[in-house]
Image (cartoon, grey):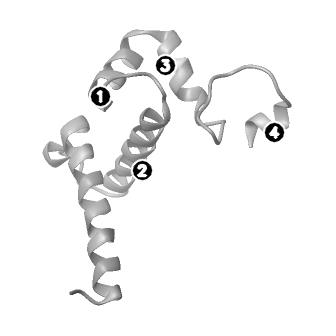
Amino acid sequence: MLPPSAKAIRSHWGIENSLHWVLDVTFSEDHSRIRMGNGPENMTLLRRLCVNLIKRDKAKGSINMKRYRAAMNIAVLSRVRYTLARRDGGTPGGGDKEKDFW
């Protein structure tokens, strides 16, 4: 039986590995040729932001398919982008504007 600290470390690496797998499959991160200056860190930040926004979208489909739909349809892109402004990832409409933003 593993001690509690080992379980915490193992669960952390499981989450970390799953994120890296998603980034590689969705954005082909391992094949990226950005290597100079702040470029790699900046692109990693943008890719993670995109993955998190796409995951919060409640539409059906894989992350790859949601990304494709957002690229092809401005309405889908707007819906995905709007989830950035909402904590619950819900759809736009109604409520207090300040509350909806935060």
Lower sequence index among marks 2 and 1: 2
The answer to whether 92 is drawn above or below residue 12 in the figure is above
Q: Are marks 2 and 3 in contact (CB under 8 Å)?
A: no
* Residue type indicated by callout 3: Leu
Which element carries disc 3, helix, strand or loop? helix
Q: State the quadrant of the N terminus.
A: bottom left
Residue with the mark numbered 4: 99
Image x and y of residue 62, in percent: 29, 28
Are there few (<14), some (14-19), or many (20+) residues within 10 Å of tag 4? few
Lower sequence index among marks 4 and 2: 2
Residue with the mark numbered 1: 62
Label 2 and label 3: CA atoms lie apart by 19 Å
Which element carries disc 4, helix, strand or loop? helix
Mark identifier at residue 31: none
Q: Residue at x 35, y 78 (%)?
A: 8
* Residue type indicated by callout 1: Ser
Image x and y of residue 17, in percent: 23, 59
Mark identifier at residue 77: 3
Q: Residue at x 32, y 23 (%)?
A: 61
Label 2 and label 1: CA atoms lie apart by 21 Å
